[in-house]
Image (cartoon, rainbow, N blue to C red):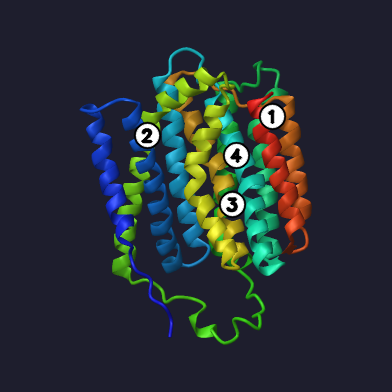
Amino acid sequence: MKKKIYLLGWTIVMPILAWIAYFAHYLVSGHLYSLILIIFLVGAVLAAVYHSEIIAYRVGEPYGTLLLAFAITVIEVSLIISIMLSSKGLEAITLARDTVFAAVMIILTGIVGICIIVGALRYRQQVFTLQGVSTALITLIVIVVFTLILPNYTTSHDQGEYTPFQLIFVSLICLLLYIGFTMVQTIRHRAFFMAPIPKPTDEDEDDDDDSLPEKPSRKMMAFSIVFLILCLGIVVLLAKYLSKDVDMLVLKVGAPKSIVGIIIAGIVLLPEGLAAMRAAYNNRLQTSLNLAFGSALASIGLSIPAVAVASVIGDFRMTLGVDLKSMLLMGLSLFIITISLATGRTNIMQGMVLLSIFLLYLFTTLFP
């Protein structure tokens, strides 16, 4: 008999309390209250993970992962634009670049690396559909080069910036590539992104009927959609409000300004990261990779065009080109992940190599 999925009480209470705590900041302030808001922020993110998994399981692959990737991108764009518009001078000129670059590095080396390790520790090897992963990778490589590397080599503008005309053109190309990938993922070659059926082990042959819970009802899915929106909304508001404390902390410890982009990307990607790791733990690596590459593509293919339009309308500058060290790390990450996922199977060493690149990226950001 299949297990049922239930809405957990804390996933309903936490976002409601988070909204109340956010509006209470007009009456209460201080470092202790900021710490309380951080706790509610993490709780809202975890609740978003749970509700998004219910929705994803109801609508099926790859629509569920696509929905979550789109929702996470809404958070990212809202944070970047709101912080850039509220900042004065040139202090936020590289925020979009730092956030998008951090998102790509966190996804390609951190999330994928940990997912491979988690799956390898439990199942030794995991399989996925090679055609879908290769399609996502070639699209991602092209978009990364267009947005984060090519601006360093154009001559119409200096210091890694596109002119407004170039920015709109490149953003349109990236948007079209993302839409094309989405059409391939959901309509034309949907089977490429479906998980291959893993071979049953001796341990789970007896519990075959209980391996997958029954799908949640439409009523439960509608309830989860409402609370997912509430969770994502309060995450945006709390992250924007707490960004001042983050800026002060970064300045106080003397860390590079680019660490703010890593913090924003980390908050934004936490729901997808946790969902991807849980999928890998349950021997659904294809879902993990769909989440990872879908969010990486959405992070650039949707975020950059939205921020580009805002920068042109709001008349503020935006630097996109990364430095030589970042290009080296990003190129290494794309090369290693392409080789690692070229066989349709993963093992623990591939995850360890990717995770080592991620740790080196964090270390060289803190200690450049």
The dot on residue 173 is: 4
- Labelled pair 3, 4 in contact (Cβ < 8 Å): no
Q: Residue at x 75, y 48 (%)?
A: 353
Alpha-carbon distance for marks 2 and 4? 42 Å
- Which SS class for mark 1? helix
Residue type, mark 2 in image: Leu
Label 4 SS: helix
Earlier residue among tags 3 and 4: 4
Q: Which residue is mark 2?
A: 35
For badge 4, the amino acid type reads Ile
x, y (%) of residue 14?
31, 50
**Is residue 215 rendered to the left or right of residue 284?**
left
Marks 2 and 4, the one that precedes in the sequence: 2
Callouts 3 and 2 close, C-beta under 8 Å: no
Q: CA distance from mark 3 to mark 4?
A: 21 Å
Residue 75 visible, this angle? yes
